[in-house]
C-alpha cells in the first residue's frame, strides 16, 4: 500500500506529571523554565494546554498529584462541541467518534443531509485545525443506529481498511432491544443477504446468487422485561442492516424498526447501539478498542418494567 505520509509528522506534544498539588499557571512556570513567562501565558490563553482530556485556559485551575498536563507546542486544542457527535480518539491518521441516533454517517442526495452528517461535522473540525487534511469514510452506521464510527485522514488508509476490513477489524459489538423475546437465549444467525429495488435487505436461499452475501450474527439475551429483550450482539460480517434483518426474519424485530416490521417504538428511535469497536491501527498496527455506554433509554425501558 502506498500511503500519503504528509500528515505523519506528529505535533510536538509533551506530557508532564504533577508531583504535588498546585495551580496550573504556577506548574507551567516551574515546568517550562526555558520559556518566557509571557510565552507560557500565551500557551495557556491560546488553548495549547490540555488537562484530563480537555483544553484548559484558567490560570488558577487546581492540579492534583498524579494529574497529567499535556502541552501541544505546535497548535492549539480545539474544543469540539456537538450534541450528536463525540470525539473518542484522534491522531495523525484516524479519528474515532460516537454518533447519536438520527444522525447520518455520510450525506445522502437530500439537501438537508449535506450539512448535518457525521462526515461533515468531522471534516469541518479537522480542517479547522489542518486546512489541507481530508476526512475519508472507513465504514458507516445506519442513520438511526447510534455508536462508534471510524474515519481516516488519508484516502489511501480508508481505502485499505475498506478493502481488507475483516483483517483490520477484530470485534464489533452491539446492544439492541427486541420487541419479542428470542426463543433461544443465545444463537448464531447465518443467511445470504441481498437488496431489493426498494433498498430493503432480505435473506435468500439461492446460494448461486452472486448479488447475495453471507451475513453472520451472534447474540445472547442479557435481560428481559415484559415482551422486550436486551440482546448483546456480535457481528462476524459487516453487511448492510444485517442485525435488523436477521433478527426480524427470525421473529424478533428490533423495537422502533418499522422498516423491518416492528410494531412498537418505546424510545422514539431504533433501539440498536454499537457499543464496542476493536481494530488494528492501519499504520502502527497497535490494537485499538473503544467502548461507549448503552443509551439510557435502553436501561430505562427495563427499569420501568422491573
Image (spheres, rainbow, N blue to C red):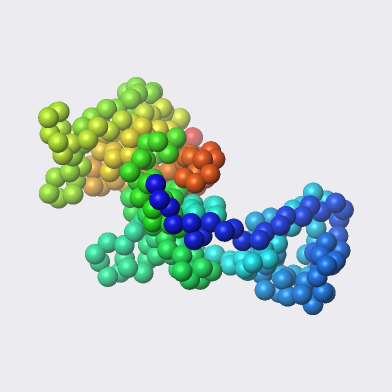
When the figure is inspected, residue 51 is found, relative to residue 160, above or below; the finding is: below
The residue lying at 51 percent from left, 40 percent from top is 285
Position of residue 29 in the picture relative to residue 246 (left or right): right
Specify the quadrant of the image occupied by residue 244. Answer: top left
When the figure is inspected, residue 233 is found, relative to residue 1, above or below; the finding is: above
The residue lying at 34 percent from left, 54 percent from top is 143
Position of residue 57 in the picture relative to residue 239 (left or right): right
Percent x, y of residue 112: 30, 69
- Check the image and name the residue furthest to the front: 2
User: How many badges with numbers are in the image?
Assistant: 0
Percent x, y of residue 175: 43, 38
Question: Is residue 128 visible to us here?
Answer: yes
Task: Please state which of residues 250 and 306 is positioned toward the viewer in this rendering.
Answer: 250
Task: Please state which of residues 29 and 111 is positioned toward the viewer in this rendering.
Answer: 29
Percent x, y of residue 260: 23, 43
Specify the quadrant of the image occupied by residue 75. Answer: bottom right
Amino acid at each position: 500500500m502506498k500511503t500519503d505520509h504528509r500528515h505523519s509528522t506528529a505535533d510536538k506534544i509533551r506530557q508532564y506529571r504533577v508531583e504535588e498539588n498546585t495551580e496550573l499557571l504556577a506548574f507551567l512556570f516551574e515546568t517550562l523554565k526555558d520559556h518566557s513567562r509571557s510565552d507560557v501565558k500565551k500557551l495557556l490563553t491560546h488553548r495549547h494546554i490540555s488537562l484530563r482530556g480537555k483544553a484548559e485556559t484558567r490560570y488558577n485551575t487546581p492540579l492534583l498529584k498524579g494529574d497529567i498536563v499535556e502541552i501541544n507546542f505546535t497548535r492549539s486544542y480545539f474544543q469540539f462541541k456537538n450534541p450528536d457527535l463525540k470525539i473518542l480518539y484522534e491522531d495523525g491518521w484516524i479519528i474515532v467518534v460516537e454518533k447519536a441516533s438520527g444522525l447520518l454517517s455520510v450525506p445522502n442526495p437530500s439537501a438537508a443531509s449535506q450539512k448535518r452528517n457525521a462526515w461533515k461535522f468531522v471534516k469541518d473540525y479537522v480542517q479547522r485545525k489542518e486546512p489541507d487534511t481530508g476526512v475519508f469514510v472507513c465504514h458507516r452506521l445506519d442513520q438511526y443506529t447510534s455508536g462508534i464510527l471510524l474515519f481516516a485522514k488519508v484516502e489511501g488508509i480508508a481505502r485499505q481498511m475498506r478493502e481488507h476490513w475483516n483483517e483490520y477489524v477484530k470485534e464489533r459489538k452491539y446492544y439492541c432491544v427486541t420487541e419479542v423475546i428470542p426463543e433461544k437465549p443465545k444463537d448464531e444467525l447465518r443467511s445470504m443477504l441481498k437488496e431489493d429495488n426498494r433498498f430493503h435487505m432480505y435473506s435468500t436461499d439461492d446460494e448461486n446468487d452472486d448479488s447475495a452475501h453471507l451475513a453472520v450474527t451472534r447474540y445472547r439475551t442479557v435481560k428481559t422485561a415484559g415482551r422486550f429483550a436486551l440482546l448483546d450482539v456480535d457481528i462476524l460480517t459487516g453487511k448492510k442492516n444485517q442485525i435488523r434483518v436477521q433478527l426480524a426474519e427470525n421473529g424478533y424485530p428490533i423495537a422502533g424498526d418499522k422498516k423491518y416490521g416492528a410494531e412498537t417504538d418505546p424510545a422514539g428511535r431504533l433501539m440498536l447501539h454499537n457499543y464496542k469497536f476493536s481494530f488494528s491501527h492501519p499504520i502502527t498496527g497497535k490494537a485499538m478498542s473503544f467502548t461507549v455506554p448503552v443509551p439510557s433509554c435502553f436501561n430505562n425501558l427495563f427499569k420501568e418494567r422491573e
